[in-house]
Amino acid sequence: MGYNIQVLCFMFLVSMEASVLATGTTPGIQDIFLGRCLAYQELLKPYPQTEVNCKTLWSTFNTSFAGKEPCSLTTKDYSDFIEMSLTSIPEDKAMFWSGTYRVAHDYSESGKRFITLEDTLLGYIMNGLTWCGQKAPPGINYQSCPPYNGCPETASTAFWGKASSQFASQAKGTVIILLDGSNPARPAYSTESYFAKFELPSLSPTEVKMVDVYVVHDINKPYRETCENGTLPTLQQAIKDHGIDYRCQDNPQSILHLLCVDSPGSVLCRMMKRFHRNNITIFG
Ligand code: NAD
């Protein structure tokens, strides 16, 4: 009896874990894809873009992965799809992020202030989706896709790696990168990040004049890394070696104001408000 209960408990836990881990292709992916594609072009229009036929774009995306084993994919599989949705980025507008998804997108204001990859047609359509193919019909696996890092790197970075490097290669003028200076679990500039592996190497030293690094520090958390220490000097060197000028600021005022929206009662935010009222600049 006791043994049976143990077996049942074990089976229950295994099935719980499987249901947590096994995420297949996002249900309704085609409808989401087409809806986002249309909404982006007809409603959002964040900046001048060339028009794309959404049905043709879906069919090109579908051909990239459907009917194929997920771990066999390479950037080449996504080339046509990415080329077709590519648009130019106005000068001084490109913004990158690494470990700072939320603040970066609050700041970019859906492409109105700055343009992240997710504010472009391609990134807007694909952001947050999961997809993978299979040889058997219907060619798309809705039950389970390999977990992150579950395939060789060539396959797991095939789409976002290519999309990131294409996006970065379009950047001109001054670009911004937002890094997290408060996370104990990862360095502000991680050489394993998409930013380090795909975006920085794809910036054109003739088109990009300056990289503005903003190190974001959570309100009320210690400054683990600043412009002067940790991994930031390594980033400075990497950018200089790439032939581009570098500037770095810790929590510039614009970012601090955004962070203070969520923590208006914190000492730092109250201090900033008081100084602001008295017209005194203390940050940035
Ligand atoms: P990051 O470490 O914050 O990771 C960015 C994204 O990669 C995460 O949101 C997640 O979707 C995925 N990711 C990374 N590590 C993961 C893990 N261990 N498990 C599950 N998912 C993981 O920052 P990054 O690597 O520097 O990438 C961000 C930059 O690259 C941005 O500038 C952006 O242009 C581009 N990018 C965007 C996405 C996206 O999903 N929108 C994904 C990859 C890269």
Image (tube, rainbow, N blue to C red):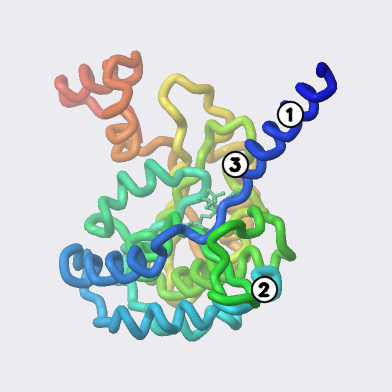
Q: Would you say 196 lies left or right of 7 here?
A: left
- Of residues 50 and 226, which is closer to you in this image? 50
The residue at the point 35 percent across, 62 percent down is 124
Quarter placement of the C terminus: top left
Mark seen at residue 69? 2
Mark seen at residue 20? 3
Name the secondary structure under disc 1.
Answer: helix
Q: Earlier in the sequence, mark 2 or mark 1?
A: 1
Circles 2 and 1: CB atoms closer than 8 Å: no
**34 is higher (above) or lower (below) than 50:** above
The residue at the point 58 percent across, 29 percent down is 224
Name the secondary structure under disc 3.
Answer: helix
Q: Earlier in the sequence, mark 3 or mark 2?
A: 3
Q: CA distance from mark 2 to mark 1?
A: 34 Å
The residue at the point 44 percent across, 55 percent down is 128
Name the secondary structure under disc 2.
Answer: loop
For label 3, the crowd category at 10 Å Cα-Cα, with few meaning under 14, some 14 to 19 and many 20 or more, is: few
Q: Position of residue 165 (x, y in %)?
A: 52, 71
Picture quadrant where residue 187 is located: top right
Q: Which residue is identified by label 1?
A: 8
Q: CA distance from mark 1 to mark 3?
A: 18 Å
